[in-house]
Amino acid sequence: MLRYITISILSALLVWVFTPLAERLSYRLGLVDIPSRRKPHAKPTPLMGGWAMLISFVISALVAVPAHSSRTGILLGSLIAFAIGLADDYTKSRGKELGALPKFLGQVLAALVLASYGVRIYHITNPFSSTKGLIFFPPWFSYLTTVIWVVGVMNLINFMDGLDGLAAGITCIAASTLALVAWQMNQSASAISAVIVIGITLGFLRFNRYPASIFMGDMGANFLGFLLGAISVSGSFKSATLVGMVVPILALGLPIADTAMNVVRRTLNGQPFYEADLGHAHHRLQRWGLTQVQTVLFMYLISICFSLTALVFLFASRR
């Protein structure tokens, strides 16, 4: 356990070192988020926080995660996820839009690279069989389910990135759950990757909590979402049990529920489901009178409840 704590602390320290550099780099490159109706911050804010987290994760993973094809897949996929987010941030800072299709194709590419290195969903337990036998997926379906999950998680975190500290905090809570699950299942590599995510998000929150001096940008949201998706595939989903499938879904229960409700609402209203609006839970809580800090803390609490439910489910199943 001390090893995991040390890795997490070192990852956080790396983010503390690189984030001030990211702020200066943001201003130099003109990657700054301008306040608008959907963006409640008071002044133009740097967008390169995702770069600081990426560099910190790569260094930590190369040092602490055992060399394996899965590590290579996660690192290469995360670079692609970061790059497509960076392209989106760059075009937005120039008053343009990258478009939903290029972003989606970039996310799919990141997930396919991950799956090509063996980090994918291979099988599940047959819950209707008395022997609990395994149902193995054909290769095409293994790739498909992995891509759907990883791309979905990337977008979930992106949708959560609406208030100072919200996406980073939600990611930290989900990563903590995945780390505990991986540790209990003796999945060392997945546990180490998860505690690195805990470290980089906690370190980043020093700068990103209200009032934020820097944002993670789409580059950071894409990157963190990819990591959560990849870690859950390499860890929990590989257990091939009902618990393995349910735990990561519960760990991400808040963004999943919020996104599902918004997709239904937009579809019923005749809106494209992928277009951003002011209908997410954090927007509604603010309209009901909560401050930004109160809203974020309330969302943290709900996310912790989902994560605790996942852990109760895990420990109950192991009795």
Image: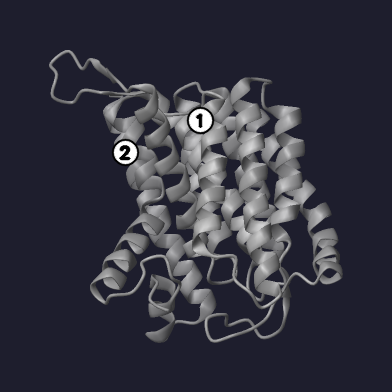
Identify the image's colour scheme: rainbow, by chain, secondary structure or one colour: one colour
The residue labelled by disc 2 is: 246
Which amino acid does the dot numbered 2 rest on? Answer: Val
Q: Secondary structure at mark 2?
A: helix
- For the point 71% across and 28% down, the residue is 64
- For the point 31% across and 60% down, the residue is 260
Q: Is residue 120 above or below residue 219?
A: above
Position in image of residue 103 (x %, y %): 55, 56
In the rendered image, the quadrant that contains the N terminus is top right
- For the point 61% across and 39% down, the residue is 77
Q: Is residue 268 left or right of residue 162?
A: left
Q: Is residue 36 above or below residue 102?
A: below
Confirm whether residue 1 shows in the render. Answer: no
Confirm whether residue 146 shows in the render. Answer: yes
- For the point 39% across and 23% down, the residue is 139
Q: Is residue 142 left or right of residue 135?
A: right
The residue labelled by disc 1 is: 115
Q: Is residue 21 left or right of residue 308?
A: right
The first of marks 2 and 1 along the sequence is 1
Position in image of residue 138 (x %, y %): 34, 22
Q: Is residue 223 above or below residue 299?
A: above
Which amino acid does the dot numbered 1 rest on? Answer: Ala
Q: Give the distance between the C-alpha atoms of the residues marked 2 and 1, in whole angstroms.
A: 20 Å
